[in-house]
Amino acid sequence: MYNVNSLKAEEFISDEEIQETLVYADQNCDNMELVDAIMEKARKRKGLNHREASVLLACQNEDKIKEIYELANQIKNDFYGNRIVIFAPLYLSNYCVNGCLYCPYHLKNKHIARKKLTQEEIVKEVTALQDMGHKRLAIEAGEDPENNPIEYILECIQTIYRIKHKNGAIRRVNVNIAATTVENYRLLHDAGIGTYILFQETYHKESYERLHPTGPKHDYAYHTEAMDRAMEGGIDDVGLGVLFGLELYRYEFAGLLMHAEHLEAVHGVGPHTISVPRVKPADDINPDDFDNGISDDIFAKICALIRISVPYTGMIISTRESQQLREKVLPLGVSQISGASRTSVGGYADPEQDNSTSEQFDVSDKRSLDEVINWLMRLGYIPSFCTACYREGRTGDRFMTLCKNMQILNCCHPNALMTLKEYLEDYASEDTKILGMKLIEQELEKIPNPKVRERAAANIHDIEGGERDFRF
Ligand code: SAM
């Protein structure tokens, strides 16, 4: 029944295979010989399959968990360096015809304020985002073929890319909208989107159907096969995710890795990113109503295991998580975080207004972007606003090749420094600027290729003189 190459959801995410994997993991979690052999394989930095990774997830040995954390940290440093890419979500519309039990946008919610941004309002939102320093957005919308048809989403993308306020620009728009058709994915691809993101919510079919009782999202196969359609439509950067808290985390973890293995097997390229959201309180949603909430420790272990199982995949932590929790998981392999996010429709341009009732969920990390950037640098990370890869056509396996050849230090590293310099010049507070200048000076030295190092230094000098948008 289980077939990684099948295009049928129930075959590449086979329930039987997941159940067997969980039994195998339980039987072997104390088998230290096997655990060590799996760790040995992970050290080769070629990843782990869902069975191997599930054994490590089930393993409770404190020393081994420490080893997993250390390896996750090393792999993150080897492949991604100390850069953390920054983005913000932009909520376009919260009209939705689905009945998702965990989301306040569900159709039956009659007291939430329903809003859909006009193109003029998008200009205001994006101007506010650019004025903070953002260069990369993830657009979000409920599923509603009448209020949010694909034409609306495409028009919004066009508007967003057109807006140039002062030195600002949105250079990469990632898209998180409901599963759709191959034709619509092709339209999104042609509109120049970055990553297409779609969270599976849960890989457990029965729970999925119960949690999505009504609306088009009820269809498990259509949702689970969405990434294959997206790839067929020409999008080769796709972002997976599970909404942790809905189902047993060990089941979700195995399903997530099986999905990644499937994409790699069929399309030759795994997921560009993996997100790890947890259910949060929202308008009429109480996370305690779901039985499978996970502790911060298990959350951290999942992050570390994702890092060692799929070393080339970016990992995203949103502002659903607190500063403290983010600080705990950053060293375990996170490569992207959102900053200063608003999950309400229109929340960036009008933060004073009472638009909390259109919010999708409560944000835990409420700091300004400048505070987030300052904090990252104090922790030793380089905040990056880089969007170069996809603008240079380095998507899908071309990005992976860069990563696998360890060319990140000659490419992503200088790009991060140049975009950080733009941020410091245009948007940073005095303290952040001083901190950032020092960091750039130190980090320039780490570029191995002398020609690249010289070019990067010259570009950084020119950014000070007013030029913008350099990239390798
Ligand atoms: N409507 C689109 C869809 O159906 O996939 C995507 C957009 S939705 C705004 C983005 C994600 O927010 C969902 O996929 C879900 O995982 C997450 N979400 C919904 N309710 C949430 C809650 N209460 N807490 C945390 N995340 C939530």
Image (cartoon, helix red, strand yellow):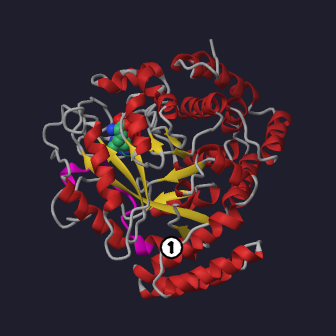
Return the x and y of residue 200 as percentages of the image width and height: 46, 33
Mark 1, secondary structure of its residue? helix
- Residue 139 location (% of width, % of height): 35, 50
At 67% across and 31% down in the image, what residue appears?
Answer: 50
**Number of numbered discs overlaid on the protein picture:** 1
Can residue 107 be found in the magenta stretch? no
In the rendered image, the vertical position of residue 156 relative to residue 463, given as above or below: above
**Residue 458 in picture, x, y percent from top left:** 62, 83
For image coordinates 50% across by 32% down, the residue present is 227
User: Would you place residue 205 above or below residue 258 in this image?
Assistant: above
Q: Quadrant of the N terminus?
A: top right
Q: Is residue 336 visible?
A: yes
The three-letter code of the residue at mark 1 reads Trp
On whether residue 370 falls in the magenta region, the answer is: yes
For this rendering, which residue is in front, 43 or 176? 176
Residue 279 visible in the shown view:
no
Say which of 259 and 379 sits in front. Answer: 259
Q: Residue at x 56, y 63 (%)?
A: 84
Would you identify the image quadrant in which residue 260 lies?
A: top right
Give the position of the C terminus as an image quadrant: bottom right
Residue 229, above or below 470: above
Crowding at dot 1, Cα within 10 Å, few <14 / some 14-19 / many 20+, comes out as: some
Q: For the magenta stretch, what is the residue range?
A: 356-371
User: Which residue bears the numbered disc 1?
Assistant: 375
In the displayed structure, does residue 115 sit left or right of residue 465?
A: left
Q: Main secondary structure of the magenta part?
A: loop
Q: Quadrant of ligand 1?
A: top left
Residue 362: % across, % down: 32, 53
Quadrant in the picture for residue 449? bottom right
CB of mark 1 near ligand 1 (< 8 Å): no
Residue shown at the point (60%, 44%) measured from the top left: 396
